[in-house]
């Protein structure tokens, strides 16, 4: 940026004209007074009258700083509506979106990998609601199949003394995990044990005792899971269970047989031949004993949801390694004659390494949250500048700081990235942390409170003083505040939290630089017009941060 001018380099004249057209359509938002296009026919510079040298094939914008300030610094409700009317977000039509996320199994540990799906799915739900979509947040609980057989056999073999009582020293979920881990290890080494587990899974529909035990475990496990979700502040619109679709898969198999899309192998297994990238995949759709498989239960679930919700899109937020599964799911639905198969979207996520104990067991999410919360409560108590004094408030703030650290340490990464979980990274309150988001927001909240106590009110419109924001730090902050719609757009179309989260972290950096600047004082500034203009700038930054923190799925902290 050169004074009141901005130079944009272009690859060629056509590119320069294209840039100019976009800017012209948004000139009121950008505060642009005039646009000049320069075509370079020689390697030398072109010169605009009275301006600095301009590279060939470029666009020169003359900026009206007063207009730019008035356009940028507005009450946040106005600026958010403005974000929705920009070229980036303007074309989004309201849709009916179902988001299937978290989806743990009752017999397996609820670990950090589930948190990744849970917080991303919740973020996508918040973002879709923001752009005007109708959203259903759905949690599909795995409660069927061989895994239950292993748990059932494990309970009879290793579960002596387990009463499924919440009053015990261990939670129900911990008890089930301990039993399942032992049974799974035994099953991997003992073929007879594993065969018996498969037999028990088949008996679920026929044995009243098995059905009763399964129902009891499922209900109590769900209550335990809801407690875990409550701890991280996430709610679902509906819970579904895999078992609900176990009896409807036979109709799907019969329809596939009628259309000759499946065949039976010599061992009795029924398979579908599915072409993927010119390679034929032999995909089992029914076991040799007639039992349903996870894939066919997923097909039944998708058909049922389409009938119930009539969705425009259904997002599955689950591991990237499930790519083949969802490809086959869509192909089978297409085989069945449904034209909406392309509306099913697999939002693949990477793996988090470093989440196992030495014995190979997953570290439970509840343990991670408990330990992180404990450390941040101590952090809050020992911070001499902390504004939080009562024990109750320290508990609340410590808990939210812990969640902020955990959420942002994951959500700043692109969703498909595999990475190593590390306590050092999570506990580091540096510029790239969720702690930085909360402390920056809290400091802005403190500034706004002090300004109110001093009877300083933010300026808007013609009251804005252009000379109040004449330093580099204010220009950088103003520029960053205009990038929110770009970050929202990227997160929406990439179905990923990292563009918005990294925008927030960059915004925090520019906020803190501006807040420390001697040229941007608010409280100690003798010129009231300048003070009010700067307060409006910081107020907008405060409201943007609040909006993003809530979009992430956290509660903004006014004091830390």
Image (spheres, rainbow, N blue to C red):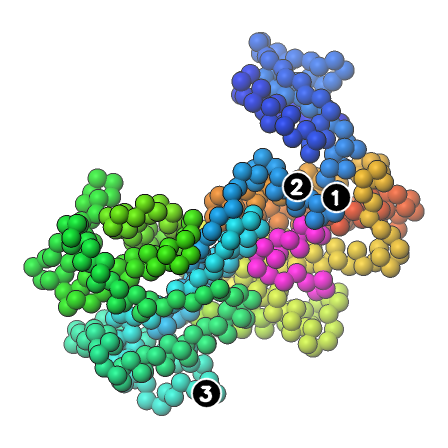
Q: Do the residues labelled 1 and 2 touch (CB within 8 Å)?
A: yes
Q: What residue appears at the point 69 percent right and 70 percent down from the top-left corner?
A: 382
Q: Any magenta on residue 545? A: yes
Q: Using the image as rendered, state which of residue 523 and residue 205 is in the foreground.
A: 205
Residue 227 position, x and y percent, is 50, 74
Q: Quadrant of residue 388?
A: bottom right
In space, the residues marked 2 and 3 are separated at their CA atoms by: 54 Å
Q: Nearer the viewer, mark 2 or mark 3?
A: 2
Residue 249 position, x and y percent, is 24, 62
Residue 59 position, x and y percent, is 63, 21
Q: Quadrant of residue 140?
A: bottom left
Q: Which quadrant is home to the C terminus?
A: bottom right
Q: Which residue lies furthest to the left in this view?
A: 266
Q: What residue appears at the point 79 percent right and 55 percent down from the top-left corner?
A: 448
- Per the image, label 2 sits on a secondary structure element best described as helix
Report the residue marked by disc 2.
Answer: 82
**For the residue carrying disc 1, how many other residues have a C-alpha within 10 Å: few (<14), some (14-19), or many (20+)?**
some
Q: What residue appears at the point 27 percent right and 85 percent down from the top-left corner?
A: 209
Q: Any magenta on residue 163? A: no
**For the residue carrying disc 2, how many other residues have a C-alpha within 10 Å: few (<14), some (14-19), or many (20+)?**
some
Q: Nearer the viewer, mark 3 or mark 1?
A: 1
Residue 445 position, x and y percent, is 75, 58
Q: Residue furthest bottom?
A: 161
What label does residue 74 carry, if any? 1
Q: Are marks 2 and 3 in contact (CB under 8 Å)?
A: no
In space, the residues marked 1 and 2 are separated at their CA atoms by: 10 Å
- Per the image, label 3 sits on a secondary structure element best described as loop
In space, the residues marked 3 and 1 are separated at their CA atoms by: 55 Å
Q: Give the range drawn in magenta.
A: 541-560
Report the residue marked by disc 3.
Answer: 168
Q: What residue appears at the point 53 percent right and 18 percent down from the top-left corner?
A: 14
| Of pointers 3 and 1, the one earlier in the residue sequence | 1
């Amino acid at each position: 940026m050169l004074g009141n001018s901005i130079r944009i380099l272009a690859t060629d004249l056509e590119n320069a004209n294209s840039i100019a057209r976009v800017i012209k359509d948004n000139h009121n938002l950008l505060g642009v007074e005039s646009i000049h296009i320069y075509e370079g026919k020689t390697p030398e510079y072109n010169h605009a009258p009275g301006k600095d040298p301009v590279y060939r094939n470029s666009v020169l914008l003359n900026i009206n700083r007063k207009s730019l300030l008035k356009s940028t610094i507005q009450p946040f409700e106005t600026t958010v509506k403005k974000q929705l009317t920009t070229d980036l977000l303007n074309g989004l039509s309201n849709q009916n979106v179902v988001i299937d996320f978290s989806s743990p199994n009752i017999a397996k540990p609820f670990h950090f990998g589930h948190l990744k799906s849970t917080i991303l799915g919740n973020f996508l739900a918040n973002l879709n609601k923001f752009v005007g979509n109708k959203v259903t947040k759905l949690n599909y609980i795995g409660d069927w199949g061989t895994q239950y057989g292993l748990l059932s056999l494990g309970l009879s073999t290793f579960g002596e003394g387990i009463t499924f009582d919440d009053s015990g020293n261990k939670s129900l979920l911990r008890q089930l995990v301990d039993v399942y881990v032992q049974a799974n290890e035994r099953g991997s080494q003992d073929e007879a044990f594993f065969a018996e587990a498969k037999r028990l899974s088949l008996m679920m529909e026929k044995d009243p005792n098995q059905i009763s035990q399964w129902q009891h475990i499922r209900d109590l496990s769900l209550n335990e899971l809801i407690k875990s979700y409550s701890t991280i502040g996430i709610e679902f619109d509906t819970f579904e269970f895999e078992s609900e679709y176990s009896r409807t898969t036979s109709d799907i198999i019969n329809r596939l047989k009628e259309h000759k899309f499946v065949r039976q192998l010599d061992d009795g297994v029924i398979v579908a031949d599915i072409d993927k990238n010119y390679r034929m995949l032999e995909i089992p759709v029914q076991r040799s004993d007639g039992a349903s498989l996870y894939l066919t239960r997923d097909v039944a679930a998708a058909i049922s949801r389409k009938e119930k919700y009539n969705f425009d899109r259904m997002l599955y937020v689950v591991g990237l390694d499930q790519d083949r599964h969802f490809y086959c799911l869509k192909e089978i639905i297409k085989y069945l004659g449904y034209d909406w198969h392309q509306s099913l979207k697999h939002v693949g996520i990477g793996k988090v390494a470093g989440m196992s104990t030495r014995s190979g067991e997953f570290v439970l999410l509840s343990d991670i949250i408990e330990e992180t919360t404990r450390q941040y409560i101590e952090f809050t108590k020992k911070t001499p500048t902390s504004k939080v004094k009562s024990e109750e408030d320290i508990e609340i703030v410590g808990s939210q700081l812990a969640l902020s650290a955990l959420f942002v340490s994951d959500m700043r990464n692109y969703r498909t990235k595999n990475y190593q979980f590390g306590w050092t990274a999570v506990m580091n309150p540096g510029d790239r942390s969720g702690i930085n988001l909360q402390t920056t927001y809290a400091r802005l909240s403190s500034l706004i409170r002090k300004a109110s106590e001093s009877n300083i009110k933010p300026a808007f419109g013609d009251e804005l003083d252009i000379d109040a924001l004449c330093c580099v730090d204010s220009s950088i902050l103003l520029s960053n505040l205009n990038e929110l719609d770009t970050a929202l757009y990227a997160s929406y179309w990439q179905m990923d939290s990292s563009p918005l989260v990294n925008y927030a972290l960059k915004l925090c950096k520019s906020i803190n630089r501006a807040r420390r600047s001697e040229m941007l004082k608010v409280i100690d500034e003798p010129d009231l017009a300048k003070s009010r203009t700067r307060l409006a700038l910081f107020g907008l930054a405060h409201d943007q941060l609040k909006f993003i923190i809530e979009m992430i799925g956290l509660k903004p902290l006014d004091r830390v």
